[in-house]
Amino acid sequence: MPDGYHYADGPPLRGIADVLDLIGAAWGDGVAWVGVPADRLPGDFFTLSTGVAGEIAQKFTNYRIGLAVVGDVSRHTAASNALRAWVSEANRGEHVWFVRDEAELAARLSAREHPAGDVDERAGQAAGPVGGQEGGRLGDLGDARGAAQHP
């Protein structure tokens, strides 16, 4: 199971101060990734022209903490070609991901720890591809937030 992950369930993030508090807590706990439910993000996060998504993503990147937006973002991506393109690009990167649920996030984090073909010395077996790995609970993850539609 991947280490260094925090699922940030809670009240909606109202502004950048709330985001910085979240980053500060993650930094203090020494975690490498924070999963934030999509419905916890400010509504204007999904309107790229506001700059909110870029500002939030940049804050996480500056502190070298990954941001995973967890949940269904399909209604937002259906309404915006730019957002759909950014989600697709982000999911190919190393700092911001959009995932359907915590199981998908667990699989992606596990794949980072054990890329295909690497040997997991604890189990003595090769680590498989992301699609073949079983997701699971990572600490106190809360409930899944639905399925995202990825382009």
Image (cartoon, grey):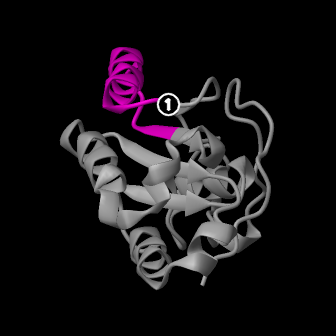
Give x and y (percent) for residue 26. 41, 24
Q: Residue at x 62, y 63 (%)?
A: 127
Question: Left or right: where does residue 12 sit relative to residue 141?
Answer: left
Q: Is residue 30 magenta?
A: yes
Give x and y (percent) for residue 5. 52, 34
Is 61 drawn above or below residue 130 in the view shown?
A: above
Is 20 drawn above or below residue 137 in the view shown?
A: above
- Residue 124 visible, this angle: no
Q: Residue at x 35, y 61 (%)?
A: 94
The part of the image, by quadrant, that contains residue 56 is: top left
Magenta region: which residues? 14-34
Q: Residue at x 68, y 58 (%)?
A: 104
Amino acid tagged 1: Leu
The part of the image, by quadrant, that contains residue 89 is: bottom left
Decide which of 57, 110 is in the foreground and name it. 57
Give x and y (percent) for residue 67. 43, 47
The part of the image, by quadrant, that contains residue 144 is: top right
Give x and y (percent) for residue 95. 35, 55
Q: Residue at x 62, y 24 (%)?
A: 11
Indicate the quadrant containing the N terminus: top left, top right, bottom left or bottom right.
top right
SS state under label 1: loop
Identify residue for label 1: 13
